[in-house]
């Protein structure tokens, strides 16, 4: 159950697009279409932004999108806004009914 | 509105025990699997344990296997985490979380309860 690999930080200016990568293995990200992404503001509980790789829960802006290629999943945020500044975590089903999270990425909106 | 409210956190000495509770409302609790996810101070998220809707299937992260026990009481709409043989590295905010559907993600979260293991 090794953590998925995410960049420690990414940044972008308002209006720009950014992509956060999440690299796993053929035992987790590469094997299942069960990657989810979470946004967490300081002192708050995480919020689900993407599930099953590319689906958005009700109420989540369509500026957020998810994709996967091989063992790497990605979260793209378009039209960056100040309120998008937060920590982002990916998570994948890892077989045997277990889950593994990424280490988290701090998004800074310049 | 789905609500999850954790309780039971606090300060405990290494080797001690603690029982966390999560009170659920706003949905049919008995229809959903439930999870515990934790976050050490300043660190990332870690999945801890899952339990199926009828308690038939229970799973743990290797880091807590043999020390933690997840359970639920569908009549009381409540989820529990019994934590024994606690270690300093178990210090974290513990969240209960519900998936969107049967499985596979964590859509609804409580506010979390802080567990501190220290002498």
Image (tube, coloured by chain):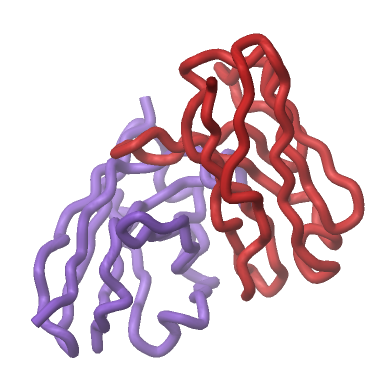
Chain colours: A red, B purple
In percent of width and height, residue B63 lies at: 45, 81
Picture residue at 24% right of the left edge, 43% below the top: B5
Q: Is residue B82 left or right of residue B109?
A: left
Q: Residue furthest front?
A: A110
Q: A14 or A1: nearer the eye?
A: A14
Q: Is residue B41 left or right of residue A28?
A: left
Above-or-below relation of A32 to A98: above
Q: Is residue B105 visible?
A: no
Above-or-below relation of B66 to A52: below
Q: Is residue B68 left or right of residue A16?
A: left
Q: B56 or A37: nearer the eye?
A: A37
Above-or-below relation of A83 to B77: above
The N terminus of chain A lies in quadrant: bottom right
Q: How many marks?
A: 0
In percent of width and height, residue A101 lies at: 58, 58
In percent of width and height, residue B22 lies at: 27, 52
Q: Where on the picture, by quarter, is residue B64?
A: bottom left
In percent of width and height, residue B54 lies at: 48, 62
Picture residue at 11% right of the left edge, 75% below the top: B12
Q: Is residue B62 visible?
A: yes
Q: Where on the picture, by quarter, is residue A96?
A: bottom right
Q: Residue furthest right?
A: A70
Q: Is residue B46 left or right of residue A21?
A: left
Q: Where on the picture, by quarter, is residue A46?
A: top left
Picture residue at 81% right of the left edge, 52% below the top: A72
Picture residue at 23% right of the left edge, 58% below the top: B21
């Amino acid at each position: 159950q090794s953590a998925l690999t995410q960049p420690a930080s990414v940044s972008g200016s308002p209006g720009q697009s950014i992509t956060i990568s999440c690299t796993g293995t053929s035992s987790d990200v590469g094997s299942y279409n069960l990657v989810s992404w979470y946004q967490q503001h300081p002192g708050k509980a995480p919020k689900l932004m993407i599930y099953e790789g590319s689906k958005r829960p009700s109420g989540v802006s369509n500026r957020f999108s998810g994709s996967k290629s091989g063992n790497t999943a990605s979260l793209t945020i378009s039209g960056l806004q100040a309120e998008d500044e937060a920590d982002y975590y990916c998570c994948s089903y890892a077989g045997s009914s277990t889950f593994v999270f990424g280490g988290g990425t701090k998004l800074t909106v310049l | 509105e789905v609500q999850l409210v954790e309780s039971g956190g606090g300060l405990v000495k290494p080797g001690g025990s603690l029982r966390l509770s999560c009170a659920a409302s706003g949905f049919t609790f008995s229809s959903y699997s439930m999870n515990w996810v934790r976050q050490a101070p300043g660190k990332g998220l870690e999945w801890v344990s899952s339990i199926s809707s009828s308690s038939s299937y229970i799973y743990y992260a290797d880091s807590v296997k043999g020390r933690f026990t997840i359970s639920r009481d569908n009549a009381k709409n409540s989820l529990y985490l019994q934590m024994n043989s606690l270690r300093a590295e178990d210090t974290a905010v513990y969240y209960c979380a519900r998936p969107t559907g049967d499985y596979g993600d964590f859509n609804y979260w409580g506010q979390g309860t802080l567990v501190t293991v220290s002498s």
